[in-house]
Image (tube, coloured by chain):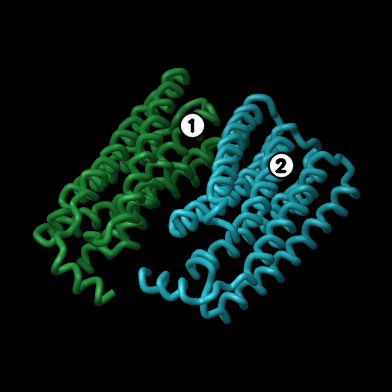
Chain colours: A green, B cyan
């Protein structure tokens, strides 16, 4: 590790990672935008069409993740700790996967209507995707943007806490107001999907915190 | 990492690991075959007997995993990256555990019937296990057989995708055709059990892929 640090003085840091990391975050944003649109739509056909577009984002993101992994494997020097970079990009990829899963759940369950808390959570997911884009764009100049990056990480955490509250209230509401058990299973499945998605964004921000604190 | 590979080149590689990996895969195959029997069987008493057989496989798998860990701990040189070897033994064990979990779910929920989707996913699990046996047998000769191994890995990936599709179809089917909420809960949980199991097989194949890349 120390030897590695020593070498880094002599070799210019690899820059090829940043564009792909930005692209990865932008795909998350695109997928999240679509998810908000999907949750706001009450027409089943329209929702299914949007789910298809989200799936496309997920496939594109997989390809980028493959390139990132390959670059990581082949690079002698990485801008940050190799393991942290791997974890960060893998978690970003999970985030997009979970957005896709959330969309799939809506398609599978065909809920009669989508309640407001679900839409609100998807909006938080979109906000966090935007925060991750902002982080990745500043990452190359992390040392000059230290406080900006930390601020964004805080925002991601705050939104996740807000979602936790929404989640609890909604479950509470479901089990006191919804009389049809099958509908309860559906809504519960959908809300768990979006709630787990925002957890992934928070996980990414946690790794980012480690990265900027060590860089 | 570079230094490590250099030293490993000088020292004779340990071969004792491979038989245990193969044995682990073979036990998994036995368990997967029993699971397939279980989902095709409608008699509760018979199901219980098969469930016990699977549980026995799981216990045997644990013993082999312990042996693998012990060998790993005691060996100076390992045939490939130590962490990866540990991970391989552990993900293989997870796969076997999840087969056992799937069996347990069927016994616990006692569904009124087992739909063909579940049987199809159990078939995927059995094929995963076959692929794993083939992979572990080739592992010792990874440098020569690396194409065969990668082919088995993509077979596992394809199986996982197929299981995903079946999962979606079955969930849609359940929520449109089944009117009894309790049956929905039962079938959904059993389905989730077998689907998670195919995910575990995919974890193994992803890891094997990494190992092969590092050996190249």
**In the displayed structure image, the side of residue A210 where residue B123 appears, left or right:** right
**In the displayed structure image, the side of residue B113 where residue B24 appears, left or right:** left
Local packing at callout 2 (Cα closer than 10 Å; few below 14, some 14-19, many 20+) is many
Q: Quadrant of the N terminus of chain A?
A: bottom left
Q: Residue at x 52, y 37 (%)?
A: A187
Residue B132 or B63: which is nearer the viewer?
A: B132
Q: Residue at x 19, y 70 (%)?
A: A7
**Which image quadrant is residue A73 in?**
bottom left
Residue placed under numbered mark 1 in the picture: A106
Residue B72 position (above or below residue B204): below
**Which image quadrant is residue B213 in?**
bottom left
Q: Position of residue B154 (x, y in %)?
A: 55, 42
**In the displayed structure image, the side of residue B48 where residue A51 appears, left or right:** left
Q: CA distance from mark 1 to mark 2?
A: 26 Å
Residue placed under numbered mark 2 in the picture: B122
Residue A136 position (above or below residue B58): above
Residue B107 position (above or below residue A77): above
Task: Determine the chain carrying the residue at label 1.
Answer: A
């Amino acid at each position: 590790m120390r030897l590695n640090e020593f070498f880094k003085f002599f070799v210019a840091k690899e820059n090829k990672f940043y564009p792909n990391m930005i692209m990865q975050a932008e795909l998350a944003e695109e997928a999240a935008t679509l998810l908000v649109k999907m949750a706001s739509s009450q027409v089943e056909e329209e929702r299914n069409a949007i789910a298809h577009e989200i799936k496309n984002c997920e496939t594109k993101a997989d390809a980028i993740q493959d390139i990132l992994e390959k670059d990581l494997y082949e690079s002698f020097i990485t801008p940050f700790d190799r393991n942290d970079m791997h974890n960060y990009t893998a978690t970003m990829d999970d985030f997009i996967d979970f957005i896709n899963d959330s969309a799939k759940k809506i398609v599978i369950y065909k809920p009669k209507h989508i309640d407001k808390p679900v839409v609100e959570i998807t909006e938080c997911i979109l906000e966090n995707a935007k925060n991750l884009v902002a982080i990745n764009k500043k990452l190359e100049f992390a040392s000059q943007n230290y406080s900006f990056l930390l601020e964004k990480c805080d925002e991601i955490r705050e939104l996740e806490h807000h979602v936790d509250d929404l989640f609890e209230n909604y479950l509470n509401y479901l089990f006191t107001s919804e009389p049809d058990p099958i509908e309860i299973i559906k809504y519960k499945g959908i809300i768990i999907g979006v709630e787990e998605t925002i957890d992934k964004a928070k996980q990414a921000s946690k790794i980012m915190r480690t990265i900027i604190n060590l860089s | 990492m570079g230094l490590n590979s250099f030293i490993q080149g000088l020292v004779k590689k340990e071969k004792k690991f491979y038989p245990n990996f193969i044995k682990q895969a073979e036990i998994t195959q036995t368990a997967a075959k029993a699971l397939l029997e279980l989902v095709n069987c409608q008699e509760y008493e018979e199901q219980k007997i098969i469930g016990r057989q699977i549980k026995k496989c799981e216990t045997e798998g644990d013993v082999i995993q312990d042996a693998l860990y012990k060998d790993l701990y005691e060996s100076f040189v390992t045939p490939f990256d130590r962490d990866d070897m540990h991970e391989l033994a552990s993900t293989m064990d997870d796969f076997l555990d999840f087969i056992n979990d799937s069996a347990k779910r069927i016994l616990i929920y006692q569904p009124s019937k087992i739909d063909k989707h579940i049987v199809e996913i159990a078939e995927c699990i059995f094929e995963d296990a076959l692929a794993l046996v083939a992979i572990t047998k080739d592992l010792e000769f990874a440098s020569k057989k690396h194409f065969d191994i990668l082919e088995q890995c993509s077979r596992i990936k394809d199986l996982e995708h197929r299981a995903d599709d079946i999962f979606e179809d079955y969930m849609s089917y359940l929520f449109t055709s089944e009117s009894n909420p309790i049956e929905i809960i039962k079938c959904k949980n059993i389905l989730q059990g077998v689907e998670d199991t195919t995910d575990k097989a995919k974890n193994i194949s992803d890891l094997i892929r990494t190992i092969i890349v590092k050996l190249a």
